[in-house]
Amino acid sequence: MPASTRYWAWLENDWRQPTRGWVEYNWGGDSAGGTSRRVAAGITLKPSTSLEFSLRPSYSWNYDDAQWVENADTDGDGQDDRYVYGELDSKTLDLTTRANIIFSPRLSLEIYAQPFVTAGEYTGFKELVTPDSYRFAPVGEPDDNPDFRRRSLRSNVVLRWEYLPGSTVFLVWSQNRGDSSSRPRLRALHNLGSSLSDAGTNVLFLKATYWANP
């Protein structure tokens, strides 16, 4: 692995305030020409002791000089003898959201949602020349296009009810949606909106505990 460096800067306000926020920026690079940058922020609103809402978006863009693509058997002996890498330009957007609602000391609702989209385009394909080295030789493009665009939406809703002191019921709804494509276009707003209608799975379960006081 080539030598690398990374820097970051962080700014935040007084966390004792009802409105709290922070901003972060980090960047770095390596001796092979790879670069990485990420900007993130967070804001938490707490208008009352029973309501809290937070939003944490982040956006990153990276260039990797040698990202693994595939292994191949070129002489037909059943053993991989070609290890293919490529130069990867990628972008990622994450929008994590949380909300906590306390109806009473015994009844609360927690909501979590994470829309996520990432896209990457490969160029400059090459194969590793010598094991345990950083030496490459150019090769043609793989048969399968490794470019990608993936998006997902993960969410959880948890209702908590303490029906007796120490005895609690949890009702949980979990959802996971996703979609992928070989078109390396991020199109952040379009893909975040489309994630709401992607195919996915829903899980609903109930958990109950009872505190037995001998």
Image: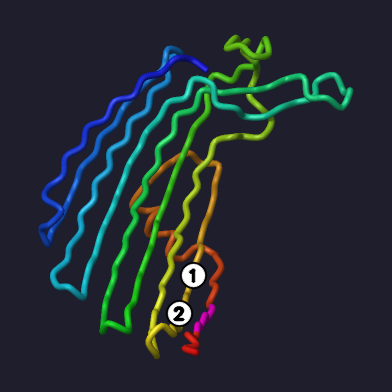
Which residue is denoted by mark 2 in the rendering? 170
Instruction: State the image quarter where residue 100 is shown.
Output: bottom left
View extreme (right): residue: 77
Q: Secondary structure at mark 2?
A: strand
Q: Is residue 91 above or below residue 203?
A: above
Q: For the point 46% across and 13% down, which residue is it? A: 32
What whole-number distance in Å separates the C-alpha atoms at marks 1 and 2?
Answer: 13 Å
Q: For the point 13% across and 59% down, which residue is it? A: 19
Q: Residues within 10 Å of mark 2 (few under 14, many from 20)?
A: some
Q: Which residues are magenta?
A: 205-209
**Left or right of residue 92: residue 54:** left
Q: Amino acid at mark 2?
A: Phe
Q: Secondary structure at mark 1?
A: strand
Q: Where is residue 41? Give x, y as percent.
A: 24, 46
**Left or right of residue 160: residue 39:** left
Q: Is residue 16 above or below residue 150?
A: below
> Observer-nearest residue: 196 or 97?
97
Q: Is residue 94 above or below residue 90?
A: below
Which residue is denoted by mark 1 in the rendering? 174
> Observer-nearest residue: 21 or 82?
21
- Majority secondary structure in the magenta region: strand
Q: Amino acid at mark 1?
A: Ser
Closer to viewer: mark 1 or mark 2:
2
Q: For the point 39% across and 57% down, which residue is it? A: 114
Q: Where is residue 130? Give x, y as percent.
A: 67, 10
Q: Residues within 10 Å of mark 1 (few under 14, many from 20)?
A: some
Q: Where is residue 48? Give x, y as percent.
A: 14, 73
Q: For the point 31% across and 27% down, which residue is it? A: 27
Instruction: State the image quarter where residue 156 is shown.
Output: bottom left
